[in-house]
Image: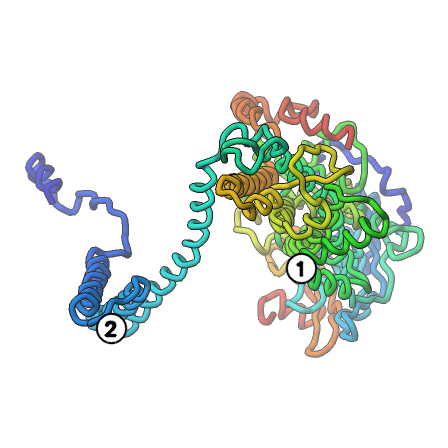
Amino acid sequence: MNNTDPASTRPLPPGPPLPPEQPGTAHTATGQPGPAAPGGGTLTATQVSAWFGSNKVLEGVDLDMDAGQVTALIGPSGCGKSTFLRILNRMHELVPTASLAGSVLLDGEDIYGRTLRVTQVRRHIGMVFQKPNPFPAMSIADNVAAGLKLTGTKAANRSELIEESLRRAGLWNEVKGRLRDAAGGLSGGQQQRLCIARSLTVRPDVLLMDEPCSALDPTSTRRIEETIDELRGQVTIVIVTHNMQQAQRVSQRCAFFLAAENEPGRIVESGPTTTIFESPKDSRTSDYVHGRFG
Amino acid sequence: MSAQRTVQAGLPPRPLRALAPPRHRPRTLRPGDVAEVAGAVAASGALVWFVYARLLPFSVHVVGIGLSWYALFLLTYALVAWDGHGRVVATDRIMGVVIATAALAAFTPIVAVIGYVVIKGAKVIRPGFFTDNLSVTGPLSAATEGGAVHSIIGTLEQLAIATMISVPLGVLTAIYLSEVKGRLTKPTRLVTDAMTALPSIVAGLFIYSLLILQFHWGFSGFAGSLALAVLMLPTVTIAAEQVLRVVPGGLREASLALGAPHWRTVLSVVLPTARAGLSTAVILGMARVVGETAPMLLTAFGTTTTNTNPFSGIQDDLPLFVFTQIRSSQNTQVQRAWAGALVLLTLVLILFMLARLIGGSRPGKKRRRPSRTPAHSRRVPRAGAGPTTPAPGPTPPDTGPTTKAGPS
């Protein structure tokens, strides 16, 4: 939380360094960041509520997403996980009727404050969507470098950046011979990893993933999970998933969202993933993670 | 069967099951179905012949015979199908026949028009048609004398200027309607929709009364272009807006999530994605105005001499050429009009193909098509050195994008 290092200038190691082994239990349940976070930014959401028109969909969400860690948001459909995720990089406000309350801090800076422009926020906090959405009018290489072009960034070492991003997303070996081909020719899993590579090129501090594997087959899913695992320690990852096993495999921390009937979604319980899955305090969490409802 | 026998003769102990089943293409159309149609056609034809040629004491127009033949065929075929296959199949067959006939009926006039123009125009078209004008061609000259070069130049120039004016305006309006959205969206869309129904002579009158009478511009190709642009604008706008709307919202979100400003998203993601459709929109606009005669009479006026300057002096174009020639007294002039129509038709076709070519090419193949093969053949040797190669630029295939990044 006190890590006020300007995120944009922080250089990332060129290659994928070995992810440091940080068991989720290194952090206390109150969400204080552990010592020496290796990379990424810390996101702190405080009392976040959200509305679509007059319909309240999220209420009083407090959550800390620690630097370099993977935080999984779980819960049944319609409980506000995706809305919460979209609040974290200001995509929520794209819906004309959307409004919100509360604050979200990135390394102590309010992303809804006056000092940050919305484009800066989204550059620092990237997003991968449920459906792979590579730009069909661009080649594979252009897709990866799209973030540079779209944000008006000049890069002298463009091809190195493309390779680095593709390597970090675990796609380099599969596409290195056809970087100029249309991105639409890749398989679904490859497209999704291309989207991850595309998000990584602008060197975000945080990567938000909205059910990134829900449209993919098990092999592609495993590949993406490996990618997430390799990115741990470099980027803070917040992932929405409906897959309990996936949440267990990839995340260090976990937040369980739940919305009672005709009520906005709330966080029932959050904490280290092992705690949420093995010894949850709330009976509803226990029921959900053991597949008894939802 | 014969194949099975020969194999069996060679290898007697092999059981039949081991033989690979013979290959065949599954077909839904069986010979019996074809025979039913043919039989129905023949039966109804025979009946019609009998009724009209042997029974009725008066003769009937050939169209009437054809229509009754078709009606009788439908009836016969329905009965045959019903008897053989039941009510559901009969309904299906009859609907299929009616729909196929309708498609043919819609297709025939187009083919007829094109064929008629080609046959009539090809008779008099000579190379001179593309190099001469009508300045020294009198009413009694042969149809093969003189040409339409002045009209072709005029059409190309006027169409180009009109496109240059209306396409940027139309696409920008479409972007406003589909991407920006504001308080003016509804009125703009209403006015644009209404403008598509604008009679073309009104557009000509507008330019005529405003620029030529009020501001004393004089007749010119440019005045004609402005009238055409007025007509093109709503067509281009509506077509472009439809195309922009079908660009998936996920692409816009992906671009915004990368930190792109709104205008960049539109410019670099939405417009390139809709490129093929946008070129169709442009073509639709051009096709809307390329044959306009009425507004051109009031603005470009028409002439028989070559005027390459669209900004000064009266100018001709192909519709005007056709219009003036076909109303002339001499048969030779009328024939020349058909040649003009053929050139106009060909021009539209060329424009259409050009736009398809520009708009239809996919990103992977665009521009450096020749360099693709080398890039592919390089893949094999690189596979060994691949993963261990350190960062210094992923080999020649990437130099293209790198150099491209500099100026952009």
Q: Which residue is identified by label 1?
A: B199
Of residues A133 and B43, the one drawn nearer to the viewer in this rendering: B43
| Residue that appears at 70% across and 70% down | A258
x then y, percent, for residue B44: 21, 66
Residue A66 in percent (x, y) is at 79, 51
Decide if residue B239 is on the left or right side of residue B262: left
How does the figure colour the protein chain or chains? rainbow
**Res. A275 image quadrant:** bottom right
Instruction: Read off the residue under disc 2.
Output: B86
Q: Residue at x 87, y 57 (%)?
A: A112
Give the spatial CA distance, label 2 vs label 1: 53 Å
Residue A248 visible in image: no
Question: Identity of the amino acid at label 1?
Answer: Pro
**What amino acid type is highlighted by mark number 2?**
Gly
In the rendered image, the vertical position of residue A57 relative to residue B373, given as above or below: below
Question: Up-down: is B87 above or below A83?
Answer: below
- Towards the viewer: A6 or B81: B81
Where residue B351 appears, x then y in whole percent? 58, 40
Alpha-carbon neighbours of circle 1 within 10 Å: few (<14), some, or many (≥20)? Answer: few
Q: Indicate the position of residue B28 as horizontal and vertical percent values.
A: 28, 56
